């Protein structure tokens, strides 16, 4: 269902215009007040999007592997020494074929995601990447319509999360938050990161709230041990929040500190009702000491206490690094993807236990994919890649988009997507990926261009996985 809250959007635009006149001089406290004032009629339901980002550029070629005899032979020939042998693969059976006779598989160590796919709770989006507009091999060779700074980690991470290179200040998750925060009675908890600062979550008005594995992050001075056992720092900061000042810097600082104290207290009180041992969110024994699992667990706990936080629309972010596998790829990626698969499986089961599986959608992202060709020890930076979407609302057990021919092009047998070394041009844009998620989340068609600026460059806005 697409929700179009015309009244709250009108209020948002009116206040945004008013504060834009003040520019950088507008006190932070006033910006906070403007966001709080956006709370109009709350939505009658709850939805959450969870972005799971694989930092470094995940090698999609060894995550979703062609499994029919001809395609596997081409895959194997293209990356000798880097391929996954067939005994270590488990087949997945898409609901509709990507082509007559084509088959696909996941590595054995991704059994959690394999099970979710086969049960219809996970889908795969093939060959998605950053694009300004559709690109052909001729366009690539002529350097037409290419995203700036391709194959650069920082720039492509920023482009993936915000549609512009490094230096981006507003991400598409934050833009969604700006539009839909009015559905929350407390906008502080609209955008939440469990993995530090992420441009994806930053909006013009919505501020990302960062949490640790145990919940809210304390102000250092509020922890007595950080000041040699003294409470003086905490006392001084709390006193500061009670003062009023006409000095803009002082007022901003006081507002930030007060917000931090208030939000931390609210989060900790709410999470106390959903402890880590709660049956709906408890980690399985094998993940009890895994830091990634703990990040995902705190998101599961925050979803469980959503009503106490006044949240009906939330955007979350969690990330895992280590995917820049130029070396030791077979071992390193196997360890990483096994964790990813286990943690996603845990998280989905938690949403089922909470009764919100149909209201929570998790999706993966990464800087870019990697070359099909081996460099001898691993793979190098590429472009298009495959990603997972998981949740009760997902039209699972299928592969969406266009799966590329998994072979390196030659003069005699060119591959129309291969720019060299099996570095494939994306056939689906991050914009289309994002638009499909945003529409499910509640962004109206008329607002889509404000969230995803280049979406008008693609003839198909929305995909069918939701």
Image: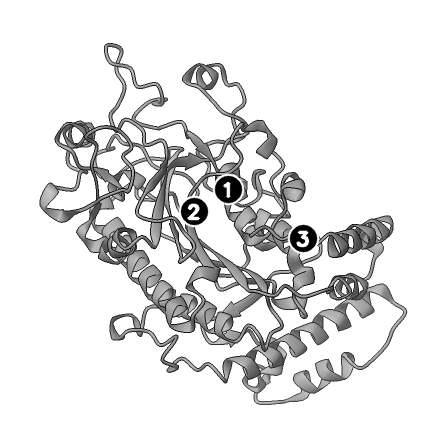
- Badge 3 or badge 1: first in the primary sequence: 1
Q: CA distance from mark 3 to mark 2?
A: 22 Å
Q: CA distance from mark 2 to mark 1?
A: 8 Å
The residue beneath circle 3 is: 179
- Badge 3 or badge 2: first in the primary sequence: 3
The residue beneath circle 2 is: 365
**Percent of width and height locating residue 254:** 76, 73
Q: Nearer the viewer, residue 298 or 331?
A: 298
Q: Is residue 288 above or below residue 160?
A: below
The residue beneath circle 1 is: 160
Label 1 residue SS? helix
Identify the image quadrant of residue 239: bottom right
Left or right of 114: which side holds 363?
right
Disc 2 vs disc 1: Cβ atoms closer than 8 Å?
yes
Q: Is residue 305 above or below residue 70?
A: below
Disc 3 vs disc 2: Cβ atoms closer than 8 Å?
no
Q: Nearer the viewer, residue 261 or 457?
A: 457
Residue that extends furthest to the right in the rendered view of this protein: 246
**Percent of width and height locating residue 264:** 60, 77
Residue at 38% over, 72% down: 353
Residue that extends furthest to the left in the rendered view of this protein: 87
**Percent of width and height locating residue 235:** 70, 87
Q: Is residue 350 above or below residue 229?
A: above
Left or right of 103: which side holds 124?
right
Label 2 residue SS? strand
Q: Would you call the spot at circle 1 few (<14 residues within 10 Å), some (14-19), or many (20 or more)?
A: many
Disc 3 vs disc 1: Cβ atoms closer than 8 Å?
no
């Amino acid at each position: 269902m697409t929700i179009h809250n015309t009244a709250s959007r009108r209020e948002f635009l009116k206040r945004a215009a008013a504060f834009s006149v003040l520019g950088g001089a507008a006190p932070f406290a006033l910006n906070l007040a403007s966001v709080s004032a956006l709370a109009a009629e709350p939505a009658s339901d709850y939805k959450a999007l969870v972005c799971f980002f694989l930092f470094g550029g995940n090698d999609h070629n060894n995550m979703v592997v062609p499994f029919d005899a001809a395609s596997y032979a081409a895959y194997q020939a293209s990356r000798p020494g880097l391929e996954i042998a067939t005994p270590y693969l488990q087949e997945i059976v898409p609901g509709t074929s990507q082509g007559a006779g084509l088959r696909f598989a996941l590595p054995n160590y991704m059994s959690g995601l394999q099970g979710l796919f086969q049960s219809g709770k996970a889908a795969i989006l093939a060959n998605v990447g950053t694009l300004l507009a559709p690109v052909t091999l001729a366009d690539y060779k002529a350097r037409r319509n290419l995203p700036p700074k391709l194959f650069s980690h920082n720039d492509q991470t920023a482009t993936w999360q915000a549609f512009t290179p490094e230096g981006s200040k507003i991400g598409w998750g934050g833009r969604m938050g700006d539009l839909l925060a009015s559905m929350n009675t407390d906008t502080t908890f609209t955008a939440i990161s469990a993995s530090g600062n992420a441009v994806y979550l930053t909006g013009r008005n919505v501020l990302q709230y960062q949490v640790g594995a145990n919940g809210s992050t304390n102000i250092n001075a509020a922890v007595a041990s950080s000041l040699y056992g003294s409470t003086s720092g905490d006392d001084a900061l709390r006193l500061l929040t009670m003062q009023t000042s006409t000095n803009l810097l002082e007022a901003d600082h006081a507002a930030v500190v007060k917000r931090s104290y208030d939000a931390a207290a609210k989060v900790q009180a709410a999470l106390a009702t959903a402890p880590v041992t709660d049956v709906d969110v408890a980690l399985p024994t094998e993940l009890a000491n895994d830091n990634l699992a703990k990040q995902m667990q705190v998101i599961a706990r925050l979803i469980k206490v959503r009503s106490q936080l006044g949240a009906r629309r939330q955007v979350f972010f969690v990330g895992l690094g280590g995917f820049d596998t130029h070396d030791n790829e077979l071992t390193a990626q196997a360890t990483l993807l096994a964790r990813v698969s286990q943690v996603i499986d845990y998280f989905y089961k938690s949403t089922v236990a909470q009764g919100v599986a149909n209201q929570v959608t998790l999706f993966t992202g990464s800087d870019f994919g990697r070359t099909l060709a081996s460099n001898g020890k691993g793979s190098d930076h590429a472009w298009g890649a495959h990603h997972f979407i998981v949740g009760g609302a997902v039209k699972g057990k299928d592969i969406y988009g266009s799966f590329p021919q998994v072979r390196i092009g030659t003069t005699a047998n060119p591959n129309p997507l291969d720019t060299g070394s099996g570095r494939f041009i994306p056939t689906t844009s991050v914009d289309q990926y994002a638009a499909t998620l945003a529409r499910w989340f509640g962004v109206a068609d008329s607002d889509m261009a404000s969230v995803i600026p280049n979406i008008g460059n693609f003839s198909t806005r929305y995909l069918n996985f939701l």
